Amino acid sequence: MNKARLQGLSAGIIFTTTIFAAFYYGTGKFEGTTPTAEEAIKTVQPKDPVLMEKEASKEAPSIVTYTIKVKTNMTTAEIADRLSKEKIIDDADEFEAYMNDRDFSKKIQIGEFVVTNNMTYRQLANTLTH
């Protein structure tokens, strides 16, 4: 690219930027986007604490975290029962069937694994087999 083309390209970029800036600032659309002091205070002020607590409990159910220790010769049924008792899964039989049907029960590793109640069966199986 020679010097004349580079200068022409630069001039075009500057010209285009000037046109856009003139339309943006000339239309006045940017004005009024800054909130007034009262609007800012309303936005920052907390709502009723009791109401906020109720909304939070509705929005996000509590997450239960559990560290399961898988030992030698531990069966899938034992693991499923322990996860059910710790409220990680709802149905131990269903989880055991999932593990057996997809051959995850043969791949369970020995060790400590951190699991939560918002994990899917697939995520739990992957955690226990890796």
Image (cartoon, grey):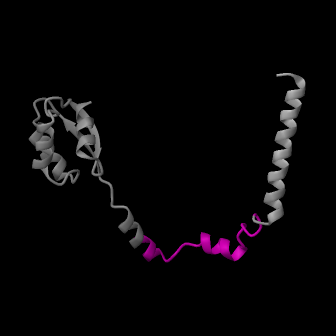
Residue, x 78% and y 58% (percent of image)? Answer: 24
Residue, x 15% and y 42% (percent of image)? Answer: 98
Q: Relative to residue 112, is residue 53 depicted above or below? A: below
| Quadrant in which the N terminus appears | top right
Residue 43 occupies which quadrant of the picture? bottom right
Viewer-proximal residue among 43 and 102: 102
On screen, residue 56 versus residue 124, left or right, reads right
Residue 96 placement (x, y as % from top left): 12, 43
Residue 102 occupies which quadrant of the picture? top left
Residue, x 18% and y 54% (percent of image)? Answer: 90
Residue 31 occupies which quadrant of the picture? bottom right
Q: Which residues are magenta?
A: 30-53
Residue 44 placement (x, y as % from top left): 61, 69
Magenta span includes 104: no
Residue 33 placement (x, y as % from top left): 72, 67
Viewer-proximal residue among 112 and 28: 28
Q: Relative to residue 120, is residue 60 depicted above or below? A: below
Residue 3 placement (x, y as % from top left): 89, 24
